[in-house]
Amino acid sequence: MISSRNPYIVSISILLCMIMAEDLQCLKKIALMGGCKEPIWASSQVLGCELNISPQTASRRLISLEKLGLINRIIRADGQYIAITKEGEVALQREYAEYCRVFGNERGYFVLEGELIDGLGEGRYYVSIPKYHKQFVEKLGFEPYPGTLNVKLNPPSIHIRKKLDALYWIDINGFNADERTFGVARCLPCEVGGRTCAIVVPSRTHYPEDVIEILSPVQLRKALNINSHDRVKVEVHYGKKCN
């Protein structure tokens, strides 16, 4: 978990609580218009027609979404272009996950495969920080080994990893200490070699999207007798999944 000097860092769960239902509706409409893929042209009048509201109301909703960091707006000669940010996508994915919990009736099973790599050495430090450590124990149900297992995913698993964002993750709250702000994170329970673990994703990380960090109650390298460049399989069992 990377620390930051920026005091304005909130968890996704808190961010979702800040989104008004009508603003979330607006965000969904922008996504349906293609806003997750690329900036889309949409005036307040056009968006108002799509949502059956006035242009003035549509403008206020866009301002609200922009203040929350869920969209970016670009003004060009031919008008206004809107793009959904990464935070906006996560908000929509969490909304989707909530509906999966309501309507889903199947068990989900996902497998990620990759190569064990050496980490940057940050996991040991941040797992040992009391306010993080306490949350890991309370929310994950195990005492984490001081360090993380780092896995570089193979190409097919990168696509599967993106699908996991639609599941319900466990939030690890950020906090301020010693004039520093420690960012939020989220965890997803998983198994490695039949042992209970959790994928941990910090709000800010130096790792690319093809690398995942794994928390576990034991030193997995020793327990599973694995070394750098060995193949690793990460299994995610999920109680409910949308079709």
Image (cartoon, rainbow, N blue to C red):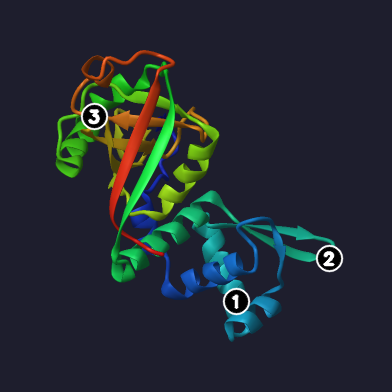
The first of marks 1 and 3 along the sequence is 1
**Crowding at mark 3 (Cα within 10 Å: few <14, some 14-19, many 20+):** many
Q: Which residue is drawn at the image coordinates 18% and 28% (left, top)?
A: 217
Q: Which mark is residue 58?
A: 1
Q: Which residue is drawn at the image coordinates 37% and 60% (left, top)?
A: 97
Disc 1 from disc 2: Cα separation: 19 Å
- Tell which of 13 and 109 is nearer to you: 109
Label 1 secondary element: helix
Q: Which mark is residue 216?
A: 3
**Crowding at mark 1 (Cα within 10 Å: few <14, some 14-19, many 20+):** many
Label 3 secondary element: loop
The first of marks 1 and 2 along the sequence is 1
Q: Which residue is drawn at the image coordinates 46% and 61% (left, top)?
A: 92
Residue 74's x, y, as percent? Answer: 71, 57
Residue tagged 2: 78
Front tag of 1 and 3: 3
Direction from residue 95 to residue 69 in the image, left or right: right
Amino acid type, residue under disc 1 in the picture: Ala
Say which quarter of the image contains residue 3: top left
